[in-house]
Image (cartoon, rainbow, N blue to C red):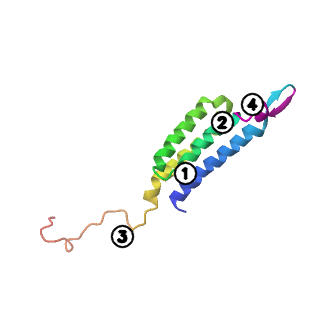
Amino acid sequence: MKVATQARLWQWGAVAYGLLVAAFLTFWPSVTVGDQEVPMIWVYGPAMLVGVLAPVLVAVIPAVVPWRKSLVAWIVAAVIGVFAVVTLFSIGILYLPVAAFTATAAYLHRRAPIEDAPLEPETWDGTIAPVRKTAKEKAPGEGE
């Protein structure tokens, strides 16, 4: 599997995880009203979806932008990371993996051109050591 494909999978994995977190926060009975627990959406209404889906919408940006994926993904990872740290004691801790997945995708997007580049067999002899010319192979006047 190519590194660019892995990067896209990590980014879409961040989006999918963010959607799962948003669904959990929206529909899981976590707010106590009277003597029963109800989902947040029953208490706060549909307007609460803005705050819950904001990190997911930001995580989608590197997945759909066609240029500078690594730079955009690093910026998005930082933005989601700051959001997660600021809201750490309420919902932020659930969004930390989204920032980590996005950072992993950013790293892989940066590595993709290097890792996925085809090797040119005529210039690579299978070793990592530099090729040294013998005395017979050196051109006249090439020095020692």
The residue sitting at 52% across, 61% down in the picture is 2
Q: Name the residue under label 1.
A: 64
For the residues marked 1 and 2, what is the alpha-carbon distance in whole angstroms? Answer: 20 Å
Q: Magenta stretch: give its range.
A: 35-47
Q: Which of 132 and 8 is in front in this view?
A: 8
Mark before the other along the chain sequence, 4 or 1: 4
Amino acid of disc 1: Val
Q: Residue type at mark 4: give it.
A: Tyr
Give the numbered dot on residue 50.
2
Circle nearer the N terminus (1, 2): 2
Mark 1, mark 3: which one is toward the viewer?
1
Residue at mark 4: 44
Above or below, 24 against 133 in this view is above
Tell me if label 3 and label 4 are in contact, CB under 8 Å.
Answer: no
For marks 3 and 4, the one nearer the N-term is: 4
Q: Distance between the residues labelled 3 and 2?
A: 57 Å
Q: Position of residue 22 (x, y in %)?
A: 69, 41
Amino acid carrying mark 2 in the image? Val
| CA distance separating discs 1 and 3 | 39 Å
* Residue of label 3: 125
Given contact means CB atoms under 8 Å apart, are the residues at marks 1 and 3 in contact?
Answer: no
- Tell me how far mark 4 sits from mark 1, CA to CA: 31 Å
What residue occupies the far left of the structure in this picture? 141
- Magenta region includes residue 46: yes
* Residue positioned most to the right: 35
**Image position of 35 (left or right of 80):** right
